[in-house]
Amino acid sequence: MTKTNITTDQLALLSLKSQIIEDPFHLLVGSWSPVRSVCQWLGVTCGSRHQRVKSLNLSNRALTGRIPREFRHLSFLVSLDLGSNNFHGNFPQEITHLSRLKFLDLSFSNFRGEVPSWFGFLHRLQVLKIRNNSFIGSIPSSFYNISALELETLDLSYNSLQGYIPEGIGNLHNTNLLGIQYNQLIGSIPFTIFNISRIEVIAFTGNRLSGNLPNGFCYGFPILKGLYLSTNKLRGHMPTSLSSCSQLQILSLSENEFDGPIHSEIGRLSNLQLLYLGFNHFTGEIPKEISNLVEFEVLNLGYNSFSGRINMEIFNISGLRKIALTNNNLSGIHPPNIDGLYLRNLTNLVEATNSVD
């Protein structure tokens, strides 16, 4: 019985080998041989107890080919990483037979067509990465409708997905990284996103999202570390509730239609390292409380309508290495002691089109 199971895994992998039309480094030719134990093949890991294939990692092998339907026979497979190859065509639906699968990475390949809705029926899936492919259509609602789904990472970035972010996104209670960057998604960010209390990274850059950020934006994100919303059509004021994201390290809101002032509450983000607010319509003075951000490394406020004098204490932040203030209405922004102790890490100061005195 054990031999039959091992043979089943071997035949499934040999079927994959037969679908590979380019293997420039000859990685599979010598290693994937029927005369050797499948557990000794390149990229294959077997379970110590049952001696079945539990992991297949062929990432970054420059392989070209298709995924065969026989993959469904790898019934003990827990991890499948085919990223950074040139697999193409449709991904076979038979993969739903892999009931133990927890990790699936198909990134940086050439898969086309709509995102398979049946991904949502892989009930144990914890990590799904399909970024940098040519997927089209909408985000399948099946991703969010299964209460048993344990997704921790969902990365759909750099495809050609369209439509709205589904309301059901709030069902991903265990997700810590949600990436849909550089697609063609429209509409507002659904309020249900606040149900994802374990989220650490929200990456929505490079879409056509619109509407305001709700006032209570950060109340549901106690451990959010990265908020990437640049290059959209978001508008309105920056919510004061952003200060409740106490763990926030990166805040990227550049290239939107935000307006109004930056409130003093931003000084409460004691872990903030990178702040990108360029190419918006922000007004008023730059709050002096920014100088409280001792972890600060990059401040980009260029191409807004900030006015007044900038507080020189901001230049006392020892780790500061880049400040961009281009195209505002600021005055007195040339820092003292630019070669001195406090600015020893500053490598880029952009202050053009302001009033320096």
Image: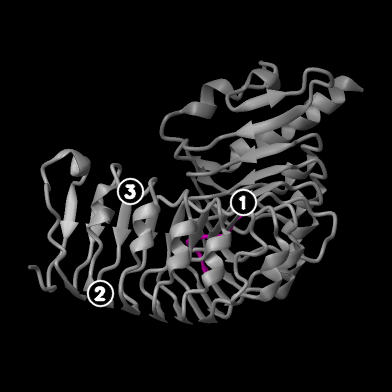
Q: Residue at x 45, y 54 (%)?
A: 250
Q: Quadrant of the N terminus?
A: top right
Q: CA distance from mark 1 to mark 3?
A: 20 Å
Query: Residue 143: x percent and y percent?
Result: 73, 63
According to the picture, the residue beneath numbered tag 2 turns out to be 303
According to the picture, the residue beneath numbered tag 3 turns out to be 297
Left or right: 314 in relation to 91? left
Q: Which residues are magenta?
A: 154-160
Q: Residue at x 36, y 73 (%)?
A: 255
Q: Residue at x 24, y 57 (%)?
A: 323
Q: Secondary structure at mark 3?
A: loop
Q: In this view of the protein, can residue 116 be seen by the observer?
A: yes
Quadrant hosting residue 169? bottom right
Q: CA distance from mark 2 to mark 1?
A: 30 Å
Badge 1 or badge 3: first in the primary sequence:
1
Residue type at mark 3: give it.
Glu
Q: Nearer the viewer, residue 64 or 228?
A: 228
Residue type at mark 1: give it.
Ile
According to the picture, the residue beneath numbered tag 1 turns out to be 223
Q: Quadrant of the C terminus?
A: bottom left
Residue type at mark 2: give it.
Tyr
Structural crowding at the residue carrying mark 1, measured as other residues with C-alpha within 10 Å and reported as few (<14), some (14–19) or many (≥20): some
Q: Nearer the viewer, residue 82 or 284?
A: 284
Q: Secondary structure at mark 2?
A: loop
State the count of labels.
Answer: 3
Structural crowding at the residue carrying mark 3, measured as other residues with C-alpha within 10 Å and reported as few (<14), some (14–19) or many (≥20): some
Q: CA distance from mark 3 to mark 2?
A: 19 Å
* Residue 105, above or below 214: above
